[in-house]
Image (cartoon, grey):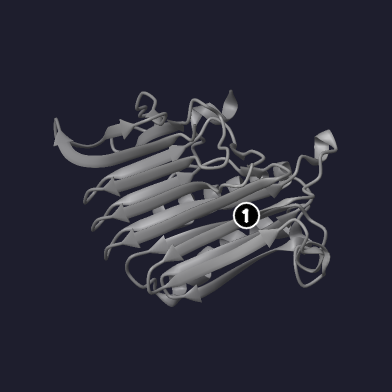
Amino acid sequence: MPWHARLDLNYRHALQGGQPRTTAHFLHDGPLRILQSLHPEGPGICHNVLVHPPGGLVGGDVLDIRVDAAPGAHGLLTTPGATRFYRSQGETAVQRTRIRLQRGARLEWLPLEALCYDGCLAENRLVMELEPGSQLIGWDLSAFGLPHARKPFLRGRLLQHLEMPGVWLERGAIAADDALLLDSPLGLAGHRCMASVFLASGTALPREARERMLEAARAVIDAHSLRETAGATSPDTRLVVVRILAPVVEPAMQLAQQVRAAWREACWGLAPTRPRVWAM
């Protein structure tokens, strides 16, 4: 029996004792939860962990995640583990995420990787709607097969959709039998993990600011072992993107975390505080 689950998460901002405070409020239907809110950086930034108790999706499962941040709110959302798309008997497993940031809001969307098991049929969508003055630092990592367990991605497919309406749209189908895409130098070149790290803004970033973000990302990339298969670009005045290819998840995630830390400091003047769950 497929599981359908929905989560509506709202970040709100208010003054408490003269200090800005962000709080998280959510409603859910089915197996999706938000753990206790933490404020390790002070009351203005709310850290949360998104939990899917079943631990993975099979054919026919649907996860529908909606995140809304009110003006002035700053939320940080991550997960305790990978999103696992397991082998399907014919139906597609779907994860849909829609993020809406109101004026002046900030969000860090930092889920751990999506793992595509052999034989999965998966769809992973992320749509981001940013009002003027809002900003988002986030990423999307996908890995195919389980190289460490010697379980390659031989069957199945992933449909990936990343969108900031009117600004950015990336949509790709990665099929296990598409050797040209998976192994060609013009495709994944034999790598089995791909990642995009992005800084999105509801207002056009001045050229100097975009150059600063590009320089910060390139400095991190140049010092990393994946420097030959990673690069930073700014395809729009409201967007800076780092793309990464890696043979396995771990170095790609490490580089993504380093880029996020560099942008957090360069763009927002904030220390590179790591979510507590990453250290567990």
Identity of the residue drawn at 26% across and 45% down: 73
**Mark 1, residues whose alpha carbon is within 10 Å: few (<14), some, or many (≥20)?**
many
Please tell me whether residue 193 is drawn above or below residue 33 in the rendered image.
below
SS for dot 1: strand
Q: Is residue 255 visible?
A: no
**Left or right: 225 as drawn, with respect to 22:** right
The residue lying toward the viewer, choosing from 193 and 27, is 27
Residue 245 is situated, as x and y percent measured from the top left of the image, at 72, 57
Residue 142 is situated, as x and y percent measured from the top left of the image, at 64, 50
Q: Is residue 61 visible?
A: yes
Please tell me whether residue 161 is drawn above or below residue 88 in the rendered image.
below
Residue 55 is situated, as x and y percent measured from the top left of the image, at 55, 29
**Left or right: 125 as drawn, with respect to 25:** right
User: In which quadrant will I find the C terminus?
Assistant: top right
Identity of the residue drawn at 34% across and 51% down: 106
* The furthest residue to the right: 150
Residue 208 is situated, as x and y percent measured from the top left of the image, at 45, 73
- Which residue is labeled 1 in the image? 158
Identity of the residue drawn at 50% across and 27% down: 276
Q: Amino acid at mark 1?
A: Leu
**Left or right: 121 as drawn, with respect to 251:** left
Identity of the residue drawn at 55% across and 48% down: 92
Residue 135 location, quadrant? bottom left
Residue 158 location, quadrant? bottom right
